[in-house]
Amino acid sequence: MGKLDGRVALITGAARGQGRAHAVTMAREGAEIAALDICHDLPYPRYALAGSEEMTETLEQVRRLGRRALGIVADVRSAAEMEAAVAQTINEFGQIDILVCNAGIADMALAWDITEEWWDTMIDVNLKGYWLAAKYVVPHMLARKSGGRIIMTSSVAGLRGEPGMSHYCASKWGVVGLAKSLAQELSEHNITVNTLHPSGVNTDIITGMAKASLMATDELVNFISTGHTMPVKLLDVDDIANAALWLASDDSRYVTGHTLSVDAGRMLK
Ligand SMILES: NC(=O)c1ccc[n+]([C@@H]2O[C@H](COP(=O)([O-])OP(=O)(O)OC[C@H]3O[C@@H](n4cnc5c(N)ncnc54)[C@H](O)[C@@H]3O)[C@@H](O)[C@H]2O)c1
């Protein structure tokens, strides 16, 4: 018996990286999966986003576990596309029990070198995109009266400042404010809202940030890992997926408004 038998999870940014790990981990525990991703590049950030082949791979991995998988191509910045994505998920599965807001971008530049377009895109994807997903999922959870789980991936950059990442940090701190407010609005309905705060995770965002800041990937990874008190350079996607699984399961039923760091001790310094 799985920890998420009979549940449905909508996961944004699920074509690759942590989003795919969330999809596969939750499917392994019995959940049906709606995997949402933009599946094309944007003018910003200055690296490639996931493509449709990567989305296909996520869906196949979920189906190989015997679970149903729905792929949705949508931009989390678009209210119309997110409203339609939620409707499509409910149409397919009849319910949404778990929302994982994970789709995100990163980049590196000094605050005064960030253009208005870069700033707006960062906040739109990483913060507005999370709000829009919640905006359309929450009324469904309330109407269903079966509680729910909302998990928002922030970052250690949502708990501290990071040089060269002011727009990213602002977006990730914003996620904490959004989640803590939503947690208060929803707790009487048994809907929990929590944030995850990973340190560096081994995904394409790391190579993307290195490319954007003209650093060698090793140099960036060394910079990140000097903050770790535990002996690890980058976390694995499963380290984050296992924490999200706990937040999605009954094991954490009275945990809400919490900021859960998975950071190899980064926030100890
Ligand atoms: N990798 C790290 O070191 C790290 C650390 C802390 C937090 N995070 C956060 O974890 C989350 C997942 O990132 P990841 O590491 O898996 O990187 P990733 O780049 O592999 O995955 C991000 C996914 O989001 C999708 N996406 C981007 N913009 C989108 C949009 N507008 N609409 C829909 N989908 C969009 C991308 O196509 C991609 O599949 C992000 O929110 C990121 O900020 C990452």
Image (cartoon, grey):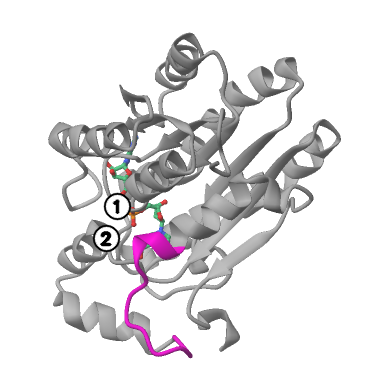
Secondary structure beneath label 1: helix
Is residue 223 shown to the viewer in this render?
yes
Q: Residues within 10 Å of mark 2 (few under 14, many from 20)?
A: some
Q: Disc 2, ligand 1: is the CB inside 8 Å?
A: yes
Q: Nearer the viewer, residue 113 or 3?
A: 3
Q: Disc 1, ligand 1: is the CB inside 8 Å?
A: yes
Location of residue 13 in the rendering, given as x and y in whole percent from the top left corner: 35, 40
Residue flagged by tag 1: what amino acid is it? Gly
Instruction: Write down the region rendered in magenta.
Output: 228-239
**Residue 232 covered by magenta stretch:** yes
Q: Which mark is residue 17?
A: 1
Residue flagged by tag 2: what amino acid is it? Thr
From what the image shows, is residue 74 above or below residue 131?
A: above
Q: Is residue 190 left or right of residue 226?
A: right
**Residue 92 covered by magenta stretch:** no
Q: Nearer the viewer, residue 253 or 261?
A: 253
Q: Nearer the viewer, residue 19 or 67?
A: 67
Q: Is residue 208 left or right of residue 4?
A: left
Tally of numbered discs: 2
**What residue lies at 34% left-to-right and 29% top-to-bottom?**
75
Q: Which mark is residue 256?
A: none
Q: Is residue 49 left or right of residue 26?
A: left
Report which residue position mark 2 lands on.
Answer: 203
**What residue lies at 79% left-to-right and 36% top-to-bottom?**
190
CB under 8 Å between discs 2 and 1: yes
Q: Nearer the viewer, residue 162 or 229?
A: 229
From what the image shows, is residue 31 above or below residue 158?
A: above
